[in-house]
Image (tube, grey):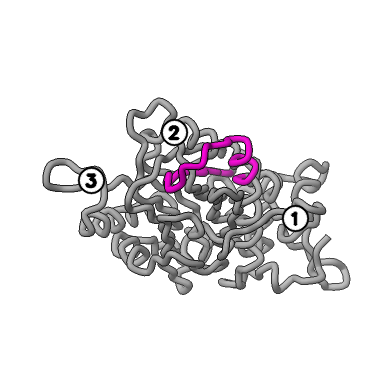
Amino acid sequence: MIVTGPGNCITDVDGIRVGHHTDPGAGTGCSVVLCEDGAVGGVSVMGAFPGSREIAMLGPTSVDSVVHAILLTGGSVFGLDAASGILRYLEGRRKGYRVGSFYVPRVPGAVIFDLVFINHRVRPTADDGFAACESALDRASGEGTIGAGTGATVGKLGEPKQAMKGGFGTASVDLGDGVVVAAAVVTNSIGGIYDPADGRVLAGPRSRAQTGEETIIDSLRHIVSADYSPPKWASGTNTTIGVIATNARLTTGDANRLATVGHDGIALAVRPAHMQYDGDTLFAIGTGSTNTPVDMTRLGAAAVHCVAQAAISGVLAATGLGGIPAASEMEGNRL
């Protein structure tokens, strides 16, 4: 039996806090995963159209891949401005890489494209990033239409009006012996959302039947059918991003491997994933607060589970916004 952490949240990992800035009026926001005392980081980019910052330092050959926070944000690359506020917050708390009498925080980040959702002129700013840090909690911090998940949408294989709400989700697994693995994921995909346990469609493009009732289309079947035609508006507007965290002691190579394996969790929940229209990016961090020997096979399996569950949880917890309905509002209309 899989045992979750006490909050079934990424904050079940010691040393992790999560904060959000949410702007429902503009349909955007940002989220921060704080690991202020430093965590060994890695990254894996498997989408063909990513937007990110400071990921080169997380590569497997990096001399020092320690990070102090990770930004997940809406607003496309404009939203990366929020990282400046996170830097300001951390510097003020004397957190970061010490250089003489001052500190240089390291804050990689990744973006989703939500500019066409409600208001493309409003993007997360440095002040919003700072506010997200100030709101950060070491306990469950909310899911669904919150933070970077505010403007997230899924099932965009048709017209924009056929999409459904995505969101911010999180999950954790307690492996025993003091080892915890967890994930926080923002699901903003061209593909639909599926339950890995039974293959049931949870969210995807909506279609109106002759009876007038809306149903959810199976994205995977649709994209390989003879009836499919590529949506002209979708290029670069879809990305699932997230952070895998553990309290295990990781090397930079371990963290990169964990991030890579974690993409299997995206593929379980989001179908299709890692497409030309996606910028799928996962970070992995190890806080090293436990001395339990690392078993990368178990960590990897737990990461896959957590990423899939976090992706699903964010979508199921979302509420409708901007005329886009949530999965909770389509109960009974799934394939």
Name the residue nearer the viewer: 198 or 294.
294
Name the residue nearer the viewer: 19 or 94.
94
Q: Position of residue 114 (x, y in %)?
A: 50, 58
Name the residue nearer the viewer: 128 or 321.
128
Q: Quadrant of residue 65?
A: top left
Residue hosting label 2: 251
Q: CA distance from mark 1 to mark 3?
A: 42 Å
Say if the magenta span includes residue 301: yes
Task: Give me the residue at 38% from left, 33% from top.
Answer: 56
Say whether marks 1 and 3 touch (CB < 8 Å). no
Task: Give me the residue at 40% from left, 53% from top.
Answer: 71
- Amino acid found under the numbered disc labelled 3: Val
Residue hosting label 1: 195
The magenta stretch is 278-303
From the viewer's perspective, is residue 244 above or below residue 169?
Answer: above
Label 2 vs 3, first from the N-terminus: 3
Q: Position of residue 267 (x, y in %)?
A: 67, 44
- Amino acid found under the numbered disc labelled 1: Asp
* Image mark count: 3
Q: CA distance from mark 1 to mark 2?
A: 32 Å
Task: Give me the residue at 69% from left, 50% from top.
Answer: 269
The C terminus, quarter of image: bottom right
Q: CA distance from mark 2 to mark 3?
A: 21 Å
Say if the magenta span includes residue 305: no
